[in-house]
Structure formats: C-alpha cells, structure tokens
Image (cartoon, rainbow, N blue to C red):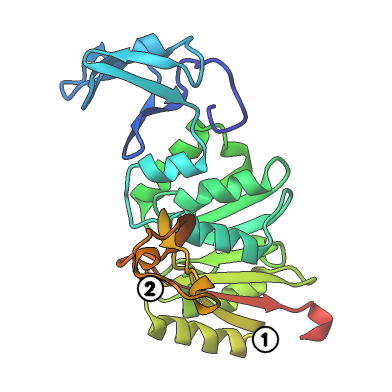
Amino acid sequence: MSFAGPKEVIAEGDTVVLYLTPAAMHTIDAVPQIRNKKNEMIEYVFQTSFGALKVRDLIGARYGSRVQLTKGWAHVLQPNPELWTQTLPHRTQILYTPDISMILYQLEVRPGSIVIESGTGSGSLSHYFLRAIRPSGHLHTFDFHEERVLKAREEFVAHGLGDNVTVRQRDVCEQGFGDELNGVADAVFLDLPAPQLAVPHAAKALKDEGGRICSFSPCIEQSMRVCEALGKCGFIEVQNIEVLQIEDIVRTRNVPVIELDFLKTKETEKDMKTPRENKKYITSSAPHTMAGHTGYLTIAELPPLFAR
C-alpha cells in the first residue's frame, strides 16, 4: 500500500525504495521471506554494491530512515511515480519525467478525470496518471500482451491503486476500447506501433463535451500519419511537440574590469603596468553534448458534439 498515500512506518508487504546514491536505487518488497528456485521459503537477503540487507529489518522502520548494510548504509524511501520510473522492472521501453510532465499538462489531467491509456507497457506513465486522477478518477489502460497485463494488474493492486485502475488485454487498433467506454473519457493517450488506427476509436471514447488526445511517436513519419487521422476524425488544434531536456552549466568566471580613465588623462608607463581589477560573475552555458531525441508528442482537441 505504499503508493496510496503518505506513510510514516514501513508495513509488511510495502514496496520501498532503497536509496544508495542518485545513480543507484532499488525497489524491493518489504517481506521477511521469499521463494527460491526450488520453491522453498528462505530468508530474504537483498544484495547491493554496499553490502547485504536483511529485508525483515525494514518492517517497522520509519520511511526516510537510514538502514545499515554489511559494507555501508542506505536510506529507505516511500516510492512515488518519479522514483518508480527510475527503478521499475522494464518489460518495455518507458517514458520518463520530461515527456510525462508535458503529457499530463497537455491532457489537462486532474482529480476525477477518466483517462484511457494504450499501451500499458511497464506502467511508468500509469502511476503518474493515477496520482493525478485520484481519489475519484479512473484509469482504463490497455495492452495486447497477456503477460504484461497480468503483471501490471498485480503491481497496481500491490501498490494500493487497484480501485482506480482497470487493466485490459486488447488490440485497440483492431477492436477499439469497447462499447462500455464510448463517450466516457476526458483524455486518451496512445503509445502504439500504429496509433493512427486507434484515433477513430479514441474519438468515440471521448465525452460529448469534448476531450484531449495525445500520441507518443518515436519518428516523424508516424506522427504525420497520426495528424492526418486526427484531421479526418474532427480533431482541432493539432500540435506536434518534441521535449528536449537541457542542463545548463553554471560556473563563476573572473572578468577583468575595463578601465577607460586613460582616455581622459596622460598615463605613464608605470601606470599602464598596474594590475587590472577583476570582478566575479555567475554565468551559465549549454553543455557541449545533451540527451537526444526521445519522441514526438502529437496533441489535439476534440470539440463538443454540437461543434463537430
């Protein structure tokens, strides 16, 4: 139940984040025993680069506290979508925070929203959707792969989010989202190999009052096909966005002060050799290299039924 709300003490079965360094974090379940390959129950000992941890020692500890390892120590944190994205088990390629923040903003997701997502994948974006729409909203998420659907459903229940999400196995490009979802969604998100095929189904799923759609496309050709499909289905205000994250380099520089008094008075040779005054300035500059392209976000608005 670690994602459902703020907690102070770790309970048995909680999902926790073991924080070693900013580049070394692990997600583990706080259970005293696990089943080995021989189907035997054994003591759960988690191995890290700083030594081993008996996981049963976490139960009853406070979130944010420091725990002892055999070769060092770590902090145990309550997970949130940002930490989960960095530590989750990858079943597919996932979206990261820069793109996700823009998706949530463009889809205008808020508490109480009904959101349709396809495909579920590893559940990275799903956890952000669930945090944004809870406590009264609902997420309907689809994936064509049976094993991914079962695993995602287990994770949502284990994280205490099962009441706000429904996971279904379906090829939405061929079968749509189902008649039961026609006219109920505030927003639709697509991350599919051929998202243009799902656009007509998304138009049916959005409310009569209108709604928003966003599609993630790794290549511009796919994004262009989505734009064409959106136009045919009555969507307006179609935008194509690429999110690039740039981390500026901030440093202090010493800049010599330009002295212009010599223009007013005659300077001797001795005066000309006097050291110049320096001033310190904080400057920023772009790095020589930066993270490259991840994908294009195609966003559009479906107007109310009377205006279509």
Quadrant of residue 209 within the rendered picture: bottom right
Rate crowding at label 1 as few (under 14), some (14 to 19) or many (20 or more) other CA atoms within 10 Å: some
Q: Is residue 139 above or below residue 118?
A: above
Residue 268 appearing in the image: yes
Question: Could you say which disc has been placed on residue 234 in the image?
Answer: 1
Which residue corresponds to mark 2? 218
Rate crowding at label 2 as few (under 14), some (14 to 19) or many (20 or more) other CA atoms within 10 Å: some
Q: Is residue 12 above or below residue 201?
A: above
Residue 246 appearing in the image: no
Judged from the image, the secondary structure of the residue bearing numbered disc 1 is loop
Residue drawn at the location 61% of the way across and 71% of the way down:
213
Q: Measured from the top left, where is residue 107 in percent x and y?
A: 64, 64
Foreground: 66 or 301? 66
Judged from the image, the secondary structure of the residue bearing numbered disc 2 is loop
User: How many numbered dots are placed on residues in this image?
Assistant: 2
Q: Is residue 82 above or below residue 143?
A: above
Foreground: 52 or 163? 52
| The furthest residue to the right | 306
